[in-house]
Amino acid sequence: MQAALCILAVLAGAAPLRGPGHHRPAQLELVRRPSAAKLVDRGVQYYYEGRYQKAIKLLHQALRSEKLDKTRRIGALQYLAFCQVALGELELARQTFTSILDDHPSFRLPAGTAPKIVKLFEEVRSERAEPLPDPAIQHTSPASGQAGAGLALEARVEHMPAGGALKVRYRHNPQSPYSELIMARQADGRYTANLPPSPAGGAEELAYFLVVADRDGNAMAQVGNDAGPLRVPFDRPGPGPDGGKGDGEGDGKGDGQKKKKEASTWWIWALVGGAAAVAVGVGLGVGLTMGGSEPTGKVVFDFVVVE
């Protein structure tokens, strides 16, 4: 009976029937099923054709295979994330990028990747990165300043955050609000600022503090604060040569000496005429030259006018 059935099947052009327990050779199964690597290649091709759903199906199928090598697995995950971003499945794409970075922390996207994909990938990568040390400010406050003049400050910052800035907040009047100035970064890494003098010119000190702010303006490190600022006193001009008494004020000498010195520059002339007239003056000290060859002397005259 079995033989008859086989003959009929051959005559009908069909494959011969197999008895119970008979299986196809394993080689035939491999021919019909594409390899995991081939699935990845097709999935990538579908991505570039814009057939994202079909690409995702093939890439998932390839990733379930234990025979997929590490390089192809990374490629499959990469294009799986690309498809997910294209379909707006951003949370799934985040998870896929996380899987890539778990196996390859140094993984980077190829050049020419769409900006939207790059932005999402960099967000995931930055979230996984080890946190940077907190910034630290190195600064020495000036011992004093000069009244009516500006004040130069400089500082250094360790671990300045990307896009951050060093700011100085200052005021001359304790009753006024703080003004703010961004310190300039120099080529050698120093931060410098020249604070303006007091508008009124009569301030006795300048109060200030330094703040490291991130790109969003959040304070990350400070030296001083608005309630406890750094303070720089202003020097005032010292007393004059005579101890601050002015020209003879308080001792009765200054004005007399000054007038005597000024009077000594005058000359007394004798006028020949009907009357003798001389320069006016009482108690003037006059420098005279006697005979042209005698040493200069000093004589005090008491003059009157005679007609």
Image (spheres, rainbow, N blue to C red):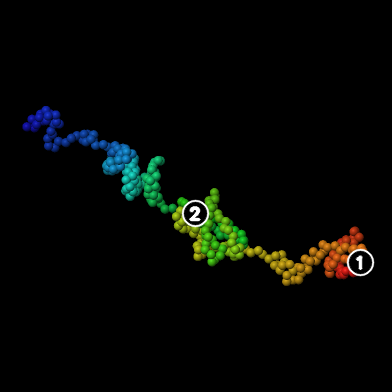
Task: Give amino acid for label 2.
Answer: Ala
Q: Which quadrant of the view contains residue 54?
A: top left
Nearer mark to the viewer, of 2 and 1: 1
Q: Residue at x 41, y 51 (%)?
A: 130
Q: Is residue 7 left or right of residue 262?
A: left
Furthest residue in direction top, as rendered: 11
Q: Position of residue 261 (x, y in %)?
A: 80, 64
Residue 73 in view of the camera = no
- Cβ–Cβ under 8 Å for marks 2 and 1: no
Give the label on residue 162, or none: none
Quarter of the figure with the C terminus: bottom right
Circle 1 crowding by C-alpha within 10 Å: few under 14, some 14–19, many from 20: few
**Residue visible at 38% across and 46% down in the picture:** 116
Q: Position of residue 271 (x, y in %)?
A: 90, 63
Residue 219 visible in rendering: yes
Q: Distance of mark 2 from mark 1, alpha carbons?
A: 88 Å
Query: Tag 1: residue type?
Result: Ala
| Secondary structure of the residue carrying numbered label 1 | loop
- How far from the left and from the top, in percent, is residue 93? 33, 47
Q: Which mark is residue 165?
A: 2
* Mark closest to the chain's N terminus, 2 or 1: 2
Please tell me the numbered disc located at residue 275. 1
Q: Where is residue 49, by image quadrant? A: top left
Q: Quadrant of the N terminus?
A: top left
Which residue is at 49% across, 58% downward? 211
Q: Residues within 10 Å of mark 2 (few under 14, many from 20)?
A: many
Q: Is residue 107 above or below residue 295?
A: above
Q: Is residue 258 left or right of residue 73?
A: right
**Looking at the image, is 135 positioned above or below residue 173?**
above
* Residue 181 in the image, given as x and y percentages of width and height: 53, 57
Instruction: Kindly identify the residue that appears in the image at 13 percent across and 37 percent down.
Output: 21
